Image: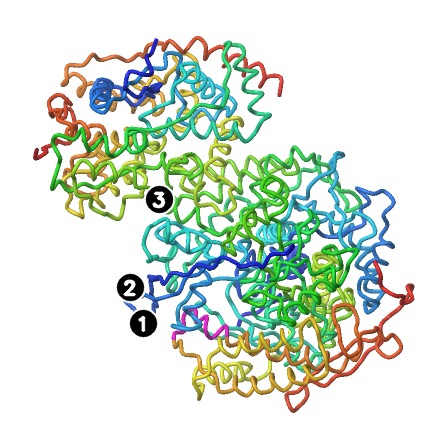
Amino acid sequence: MLTYDVLIVGSGGAGLYAALKSRIEEDLQVAVLTKVYPTRSHTSAAQGGVNAALANKDSTDTWEQHWFDTVKGSDYLADQEAAELMCREAPEVIREMEHWGCPFDRTKAGKIAQRPFGGASKPRACYAEDKIGHVMLHTLYEQGLRHGVNYFNEWVTLSLIHNGQRCLGVNALNTRTGQLHTIQAKAVILATGGYGRVYWNRTSNAYGNTGDGAALAYRAGLPLKDMEFVQFHPTGLRRTGILMSEGARGEGAYLLNALGERFMSRYAPDKMELAPRDLISRAIETEVREGRGGPDAEVFLDLTHLGMERILQRLPQIRQLCIGFEGIDPIEEPIPIKPTAHYSMGGIHTDINGLSPIEGIYAAGESGCVSVHGANRLGGNSLLDILVFGRRAGNHALEYARQNDFQPMITNPLATAEARIQKLMDGESQERTADIRREMGNLMAEKAGIYRVAADLKQAVAGLAELKVRFKRLKVRDKSKIFNTELVAALELENMLDVAEVISQGALERVESRGAHYREDFPKRDDKNWLKHTMATKGSDDRPILDFKPVTISRFQPEERTY
Amino acid sequence: MIDLNDGNMHYAFYSGCCFQGADARFFEILGDVFDKVDVKLHIIAEAVCCGAGVIEERSELTSLSINARNMAAAEKMGLPFYTPCSTCFNVISNVQKRLREDTQLFDQVNEILAVDNIEYKGECKITHTLWMLAQDVGLQKLAERVTHPLNGLRVASYYGCHTRNPSDIQNYESSDNPTSLEDILKVLGVDIVDYDTRDECCGYHLTWPNNELSMKMTGSVLQGAQKQDVDLMVTSCPLCFKNLDGVQPKALAATGQDFRLPVLFLPELVGLACGMSPKEMKLDWHTVPVQVRL
Amino acid sequence: MSEKIIPTREKILANIRIQRFTPDKDRTPYFDNFKVEVETGMTVLEALRLIKNQQDSSLTFRAFCRSAICGSCTVRVNADPVLACSTQLLPIIKDFGKASVTITPMSNLPILRDLVVDIDPVIEKLAKMHPYLMKNKERIPKTLEQESLMSQKELTQFGQLTDCILCGACFSTCSAVKVDKTYAGPLSFAKAYRFSIDPRDSFRGMRIQASMDQGLWSCVQCRKCIKVCPKDIRPADSIRDMRRIAIDDGIHDTPGSRRAKAYTDDVEKFGQVNKPMLPVIVNGTKGWAAIEAAEVGLKKHGLEVTRQVCKLPGQSGSAKVYSKIREIEKKGK
C-alpha cells in the first residue's frame, strides 16, 4: 500500500502551498494527488490580483480596512475572526511568494505593485499583468519540485477513509492504468477547488471544477457549509462562459439587448454598465426572460463605438479572447455574452486551520469554507484565501503528522470503490453522462441560478432527484482501462449531483436575499433570522439534512451593503 | 542610375554568404534566370553578412544594428530588398519587426548608425525568391516564359524553415499552409508529390556545433521524399540545398540509407523550364548527379 | 435609435479526421472520420467534445481550463501543434481550402491513448534545469517582514517567459528533439533562462551547466517553437540568450561558443564569415579533413582554392557600428 505522512488532494494554489509547507523541512513524505497535472489547475485562470494591505501604493492602507472590506463584501456572513486572520496574514504570505520568485509587477520603488479593485477601499490587489493566478501556481509548483514533493498526476480520488475520529487515507483511481489504489495517510488535505460546473455550460470555471472535494467530504459524513452561495459574473462569452473582464465596461462598452437597446437604463439609470456585478447579472436575466435576448439567450457587450484604435490599444486581450474563443472580432461586431457562474463561496466546513471535524482531514481554498467570503467574495480575495489557508492547513497537518502515528487501516478499504466503478461500467440502461450532465446544468441555471424563487427551487430539488435516479442506471460505454475519460466524467457527474442537491436545498430553505443568493420572493436581507451559516450533512436517505450555525461577529455590526 | 521604367522589375540584391565555393555559380545563374522573367538585381554594395542569428549569441544589439544598416543601404537605393537566402530573410525580417515594434530600440539603433552616416527608416520591403516569382513577377508571366515545361516530372517541394517560422516574419502567405512554391512548380509543369517530411528541418544550422544531429535531420528529410519515389526534390532555400545535395552521401550514410536523390535549387528548375540548358546551369557541379528528362 | 443585432453565424459541414489508438485494443494507430457542423466560434476543443458527447464517448483527449491558460489540450491540427481550446475551426478550414481537418496527438512523445500523450519526458527534462528560484541572499531579505526589491525593468527582462504554460507545443514541434531524445527541448531552456536572469536568484552557474548537459548548442534555430508557442514566449530566442550568458560567464570552449565568436569577429573584420576556415575554427585540428575535402571539390570544377576571405566593401562602415556598440556595451557594464 502507498503510504504518505501528508496527502494533498488537488494541485491548485491551496494544494501546492499546503504540500510545500508540509514538505519544506523535507522530513515528511508528502504527495499531491491530482486528476490533472499540477500546473493545469484552475488557479492559473485567475487574472486580476491578490489582496494584501502592503500599503505599497497607498501608504494609509491597513489590514483592518481590508478586514472591513471583506466582511462588508461578504454581506456580513463571513466569520469575522477568520476574515481577520486572513487579512492580517496576507502581507506575509505575499512576501513569502515573492521570496520564492513569484514575478509580481513592481512599483517605481521596486516594491510589489498594487491596483484598485471593486469593493476595496484602497488599491491593494497585487498583480502580474493579467496572469497573477498563473504565475502563483507555477511558483508553487517550481518550489515543490525543488523540495521533493511527490506528484500523482491524473489520479482521481474516489473516497476518503476515516474511522470516525481520525483520517486513514483515500481510495483513488490511476487513470493511466485503470487500477484502484488505497493510499494510507496520516493527514489528507482536500484542495479540489470549486463547484461552478454544476451549472455546466453556464460557468467561467474549468471543466474539472466539479465539487469533487465537497462531494468526497459529504459522502464521508462531513458537513458542507453555505453551499447555496454561488457568485455569478455578468459577462461570460456565449459559447464557453469565459470571462470578459470588467475592464471592457470600464473603457465604455455598452450592454445591448437583441433590439440594440442599452437596457441598463431600465435597471441602473445612473451607473448604467458600471453597476455592481449581481445587479447586471439580474438585469441580463430579465432581458432574456422577457424575450429581448439573442438567438442563444444572450445579450451583447458592444465595443464597436470605441473604434479600432482604442480597442487595439486598451483592450487587446479582450479582443484576442473574442477572436480565439468566440470567432468574432469586437472591432466589427458586438460580443455575445451571458452571465456565468464564477465562484463557489460555500465548501467543506473547517476551522481556521482548515481542519474538518475529523482529525487529520483538512480542506483549503475554494473547496473549503472557513468562512471568509460569506455570501459574496470580494475580488482579489480568492487567491488570498488559497494562500493563507493552504499554508495554514499545510503547517497544521505537518505538526499533526509529526506527532501522530499511522492508524490501522480498515479491512478491505477498496471494496466500495471497486463496486462503484463496476456498477458504472455495467449500467443497466442506455443513459449517458453527457445528457444527464447537460440537463443538470440547465436545471440549475434556470431554477437555482441568478434568480431564485421557492417554486423554481422545489422544481430543482425534484429534478435533481430524478436525475440521480437516472444516474444510478447510467452506463459507461468506453470499456478500456486506459485513460477512460468517460468513466472520469461519470464520477464527476456523481459528485456534481450531490453538490447541486445541497445547493438547491440550501437556496430553498434560506428565505432571504444575501450577497450572491437572490430570492425574488424574499428580496431583503434578514439578519434577525438568517445571519447564520447553512450546514448540510448527508442523511441516511441520501438527502441533505440542513442545520444552521451562528456567524462569528467580533467587530463589525451588520449594516446595509451599499457601494 | 537605374531606369525604373525600363519594363523590368528592379531589386536591391542581398546575396548573403551562401553562394560560396561551388555555389558561386549561382551569382550568374540567378542573373540569367531572372532575365527570363524581366527581373534585374542590383547588388547592395554596402552590405555585410547578416550574422545568421549567431551574432545574437554574443550581442543582440550588434545583430540589430548591422542588419538595420543592411536594410538602410537598400532603402538608399530606393528598391525592395531581395535575398535568395532564407536565413538572411529570416534574420533581417525579424530585425525589421523588432525595430518596428520597439521605438526606443529603433531610436537607439539609429543613433548607432549615425557613426556611419546612414539612417534606417523602417520602410524597406523585404522579399524572397518565392514571393518575387509567385507575386511580383506573377504566375501568369512566369507561365508565358516557360518554353520547356517539365511535364511528368515527380517533384517533392521543400521550403525549409526560415521563410515560414515564425509566422510573423512575413505577410505574404499562410505560414501553416504555404503554397507559393507549389504554385510556381505547377506553372513549370511538374507533378507535385506529397511526402511526410516536407515540414521537417534540414539541419543546416547544426553543421558546425553538432554535425551528427545535422546529418540525421538531413537524412530524415531525404528519406521521406525518397519513399514517395520522386524524381527530384526542389528547395527554395540555398542553405537547405547545401545540406540536401552537398552532403547528401554523408547524411544518408549517417542514417543508414543507400540511395541518391537529385536536389535542385528552385531557380535552377525555373531556368530549365525557361529554356536554359543543364550545361549553362552547371548542373554537373551538383554532388548528386541530376538527369532531367527534358 | 437602436438597431436590431443580427449576429453573423456561418455553418459548414466538415469532416474531422482523428487519429485513434487504444493500447489495450489496437495494435497501431488508425484514423476515424466524424461529420461535424462547424459554426462561427467553434473551437477544435468544442468539436472534440461534441463528438465525444454525441458520437463516440470513447474518444480520448485532455482538456481542462478551455481558456488557454492550463496547457492541457495541445493537439496537432493539420500537423501544427495548437491549443485545441483557443483554435477556431472555420479559419483553418478556409486556410487549407477544404472542409476536412486532421487532428493527431503531439509528436516527439509517446501516445497513451488517442490524442493523449505522455508528457512526463518534458517535465523530467525541465526538472533537471533547476527550474525554481534559489535565493540570492543579497537581494532577498532574511525574514518575511520585507519584500525584496526589484525594478520593473529587471522584471521585464524575463516577464514574458513566465507566461509559459508547459503545454508542450514547442517540444512537439522541435527539430532537435526529434533526432536526439536526450535534448532538453525548447521550454526547458526558456525556463532555465528565466531564472538565470532573475536578480533574486543565485543558481545561474548550475543552470548553465545543466543546459550544456542537455544540449544547449543542439538547437538548430529552425524557429518552429516560436511559431507554435501559444503564449509567444519565443523559446528559440531564449536559447540564443542562454548561449549568450553561458559565453559571458566564461564558456568559450565549445564548438558553439567558438562559432559565435568566429561569426561576430569575422563580420567585423571582413564583413563576412571566413567560411573556408570555419571547420578548424570551430572544431580545431579535426576540422582540417573537412577543409581538404572541400578543396578537392573546388579543384575538380577548376575553381581557385583559398583559405582567406576578402574584405567586403561594406566592412569599413560596419566596423564603425561595431566600435560604437562596444563603447555602449562597455558603458552598460
Q: Which residue is mark 3?
A: C180
The secondary element bearing badge 3 is classed as loop
Amino acid marked by disc 3 = Asp
**With B16 as the anchor, is C318 left or right in this view?**
right
Q: Quadrant of the C terminus of chain A?
A: bottom right
Amino acid marked by disc 2 = Tyr
Determine if marks 2 and 1 fall on one subunit.
yes
Labels 1, 3: front one: 1
Q: Measured from the top left, where is residue C9 in percent x and y?
A: 47, 59
Labels 2, 3: front one: 2
- Residue range highlighted in magenta: A480-489
Q: Measured from the top left, where is residue B199 in percent x and y?
A: 31, 43
Q: Measured from the top left, where is residue C135 in percent x and y?
A: 66, 41
Q: In this picture, is A468 found above or below A148?
A: below
Mark toward the start of the polypeptide (1 vs 3): 1
Labels 2, 1: front one: 2
**With A477 as the anchor, is A155 left or right in this view?**
right
Residue farthest to the left, as pictured? B293
Determine if marks 1 and 3 fall on one subunit.
yes
**With A493 as the anchor, is A77 left or right in this view?**
right
Name the residue rendered at 41%, 29% in the picture. C256
The secondary element bearing badge 1 is classed as loop
Residue C63 disc label: none
Q: In this picture, is C192 found above or below C69?
A: above
Magenta residue check for A488: yes
Amino acid marked by disc 1 = Lys
Residue farthest to the bottom, as pictured? A541
Q: Which residue is mark 1?
A: C25
Dot 3, crowdedness within 10 Å: few (<14), some or many (≥20)?
A: some
Q: Chain of mark 2?
A: C
Q: Which residue is mark 2?
A: C30
Dot 1, crowdedness within 10 Å: few (<14), some or many (≥20)?
A: few
